[in-house]
């Protein structure tokens, strides 16, 4: 059975789970084994299962070579818990699988998961102001008008309006684009672009659009410093100073300007553990539970890096500003620590980059409900984030320009509806512009005398010059 690329869309984690199980059952060699003077048919050792599944995950484009042997063992623990495999005595349900010589087998029943039924999220229709719609409120109360005696002149005016000779006056209620309108425009156009990049017919299966806060998008776009890091209005949501100092210490090692106390052997590992402990105690991952399915869907685009970068750019704009800022600082620290050759190894058994992924994956992405592949999916996403964090965590300029142009267009339409005469003067139509600024006849440049002369001809010897 050939592995398939599971693209973006609803229930991607469940589809990946079923895909891996089918590949594992088809590719795991089964043979006869002996245990305590008894023979068992069609089974396998735990170490053989680890070897087979690790090779399968590493060669699968949905996961890649970043998958470690330890992560493979954890996945097999979940296989045992969910009755994908069982021991030779038929026991399952616990995560006591170890990388050893114990024997396991496949159960006869199918372990594939069914797709959960999610409550349908109704599409949120964003209503923009109607220029001709009267505004509700006390100003719409009927204005008392004195009765007018009908005479011949008044009758003539009303008759002319009725037959269409004179257009009837119509009140134009002035409507302005409020900040709320602009924020809703940002939300609508951002989600539309995300849907297009993901190639989905609808975002309903991967995102409840009602949970997207339009204010967060606008703040993430405009409230940034020179480095592109989000600036928070509520300073109480900033990272503590001691955590920022610890992160700077490892990034700039061995130049730790913020730390005045002397260092000791193993000091850098204690600093790293402090950072890991702080981010691990968060109640919710930085990418939030609400957007888990969106980011998992983006993983289906990693074969097209440019599309994956754009999809992650847009998805990260949906985050609360404090989450986006922490994500920016954390991923930047992870990438720079991985490239810091002067920093001593933070682990004896694992490379620094792999350690970064293992330590912070779950505090960046995980599901509220336990999903068996969320650790592997998070590791895949975090690796891609570290490689492309400068682009992904910046504001998408093309999206920003298109939305700003659209807002300017709507504001101009509003001005035209409210003040047609002023608009006609300030922004003349092509016909009136031609009347106001008649085109001048272009004069032909004077013909120079030397231009009429023939070009220089080379000298040719004639008969008269012959001797």
Image (cartoon, rainbow, N blue to C red):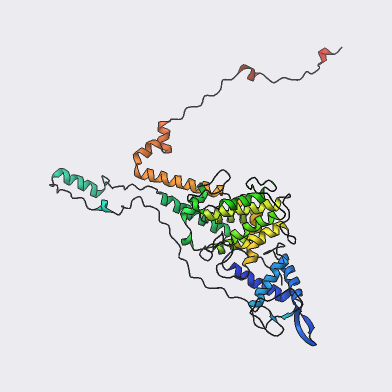
Q: How many numbered marks does the figure carry?
A: 0
Outermost residue on the right side: it is 467
Q: Tell me what residue is drawn at x 63 percent, y 66 percent.
A: 375
Pick the residue in front: 160 or 171: 171
Q: Quadrant of the N terminus?
A: bottom right
Pick the residue in front: 402 or 57: 57
Q: Where's residue 113, x and y in %? A: 60, 75
Q: Tell me what residue is drawn at x 76 percent, y 74 percent.
A: 47
Please identify the quarter of the rendering in which residue 304 is found: bottom right
Q: Quadrant of the C terminus?
A: top right
In the image: residue 218, left or right of residue 262? left
Residue 107 versus residue 124 in the image, above or below = below
Please identify the quarter of the rendering in which residue 51 is found: bottom right
Residue 338 versus residue 54 in the image, above or below = above
Pick the residue in front: 231 or 112: 231
Q: Where's residue 186, x and y in %? A: 48, 52
Residue 372 visible here: yes
Residue 303 visible here: no
Outermost residue on the bottom side: it is 38
In the image: residue 268, left or right of residue 200? right
Q: Where's residue 198, x and y in %? A: 57, 59
Q: Where's residue 406, x and y in %? A: 47, 48
In the image: residue 204, left or right of residue 58? left
């Amino acid at each position: 059975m050939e592995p398939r690329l599971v693209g973006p869309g609803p229930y991607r984690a469940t589809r990946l789970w079923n895909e891996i199980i089918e590949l594992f059952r088809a590719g795991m060699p089964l043979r006869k084994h002996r245990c305590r003077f008894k023979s068992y048919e069609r089974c396998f050792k735990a170490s053989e299962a680890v070897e087979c599944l690790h090779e399968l995950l590493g060669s699968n484009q949905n996961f890649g070579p970043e998958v470690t042997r330890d992560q493979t063992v954890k996945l097999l623990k979940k296989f045992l818990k969910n009755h994908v495999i069982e021991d030779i005595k038929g026991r399952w349900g616990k995560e006591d699988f170890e990388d050893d010589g114990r024997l396991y087998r496949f159960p006869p029943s199918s372990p594939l998961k069914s797709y959960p039924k999610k409550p349908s999220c109704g599409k949120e229709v964003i209503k923009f102001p109607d220029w001709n719609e009267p505004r509700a409120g006390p100003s719409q109360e009927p204005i008392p008008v004195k009765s007018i005696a009908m005479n011949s002149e008044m009758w003539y005016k009303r008759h002319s309006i009725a037959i269409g000779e004179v257009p009837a006056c119509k009140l134009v209620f002035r409507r302005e684009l409020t900040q709320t309108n602009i924020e809703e425009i940002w939300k609508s156009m951002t989600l539309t672009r995300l849907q297009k990049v993901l190639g989905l017919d609808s975002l309903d299966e991967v995102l409840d659009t009602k949970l997207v806060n339009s204010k967060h998008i606008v703040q993430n776009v405009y409230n940034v410093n020179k480095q592109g890091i989000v600036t928070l209005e509520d300073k109480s949501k900033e990272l503590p100073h001691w955590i920022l100092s610890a992160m700077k210490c490892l990034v700039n090692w061995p130049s730790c300007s913020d730390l005045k106390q002397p260092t000791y052997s193993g000091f850098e590992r204690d600093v790293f553990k402090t950072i890991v402990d702080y981010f691990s105690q968060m109640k919710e991952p930085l990418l939030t539970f609400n957007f888990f399915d969106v980011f998992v869907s983006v993983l289906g685009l990693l074969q097209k890096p440019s599309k994956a970068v754009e999809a992650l750019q847009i998805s990260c704009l949906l985050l609360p500003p404090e989450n986006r800022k922490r994500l920016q600082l954390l991923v930047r620290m992870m990438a720079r620590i991985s490239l810091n050759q002067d920093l001593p190894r933070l682990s004896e058994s694992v490379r620094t980059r792999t350690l970064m992924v293992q330590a912070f994956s779950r505090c960046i992405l995980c599901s509220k409900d336990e999903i068996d592949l969320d650790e592997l999916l998070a590791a895949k996403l975090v690796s891609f984030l570290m490689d492309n964090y400068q682009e992904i965590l910046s504001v998408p300029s093309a999206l920003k320009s298109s939305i700003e142009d659209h807002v300017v267009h709507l504001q101009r339409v509003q001005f035209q509806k409210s003040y047609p005469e002023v608009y006609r003067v300030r922004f003349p139509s092509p016909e009136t512009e031609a009347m106001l600024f008649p085109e001048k006849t272009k004069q032909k440049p004077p013909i120079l005398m030397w231009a009429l002369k023939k070009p220089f001809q080379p000298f040719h010897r004639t008969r008269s010059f012959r001797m």
